[in-house]
Image: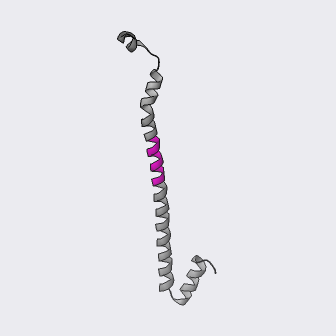
């Protein structure tokens, strides 16, 4: 094939473009999946920290309350056994 006809040939241009673009597209998809997993893990950890903080405050309120306050707090916040 003559060099002039080689550079003028238009066949296979789409395959070349997809071959060059595919790694970039797959990298972007992989980054989006990793970011999604990171955000999900962060939300679960935040929920666990919030639950622990609420449980600690609830425990302190029950421990520092008088008997009448304690029974009122227990009835309002703690599940019945």
Residue 10 vertical position relative to residue 43 in the rendered view, above or below: above
Quadrant in which residue 28 is drawn: top left
Task: Residue 7 in the image: state x and y as whole percent.
Answer: 38, 14
Q: Which of 59 and 70 is in front in this view?
A: 59
29 magenta-colored: yes
| Rendered-image quadrant of the C terminus | bottom right
Q: Which residue is drawn at 50% across and 69% down?
A: 51
Side of 75 relative to 60 (left or right): right
Q: Nearer the viewer, residue 21 or 48?
A: 21
Of all residues, the one furthest to the left in this rendering is 3
Task: Residue 3 in the image: state x and y as whole percent.
Answer: 35, 12
Task: Residue 72 in the image: state x and y as whole percent.
Answer: 58, 83
Q: Which residue is drawn at 49% across and 66% down?
A: 48
Residue 41 vertical position relative to residue 54 in the rendered view, above or below: above
Q: Nearer the viewer, residue 44 or 20?
A: 20
Residue 9 vertical position relative to residue 69 in the rendered view, above or below: above
Of all residues, the one furthest to the right in this rendering is 81
Q: Is the magenta stretch mostly helix, strand or loop?
A: helix
Task: Residue 10 in the image: state x and y as whole percent.
Answer: 44, 15
Quadrant in which residue 1 is drawn: top left
Of all residues, the one furthest to the front in this rendering is 1
Q: Which residue is drawn at 49% across and 55% down?
A: 40
- Residue bounds of the magenta highlight: 28-38
Q: Which of 77 and 52 is in front in this view?
A: 52
Residue 35 vertical position relative to residue 60 in the rendered view, above or below: above
30 magenta-colored: yes
Q: Residue at x 46, y 29 (%)?
A: 18
């Amino acid at each position: 094939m003559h060099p002039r006809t080689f550079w003028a040939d238009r066949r296979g241009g789409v395959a070349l473009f997809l071959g060059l673009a595919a790694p970039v597209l797959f990298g972007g998809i992989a980054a989006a999946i990793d970011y999604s997993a990171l955000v999900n893990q962060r939300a679960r950890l935040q929920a666990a920290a919030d639950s622990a903080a609420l449980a600690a405050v609830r425990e302190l309120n029950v421990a520092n309350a008088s008997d009448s306050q304690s029974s009122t707090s227990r009835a309002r916040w703690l599940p019945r056994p």
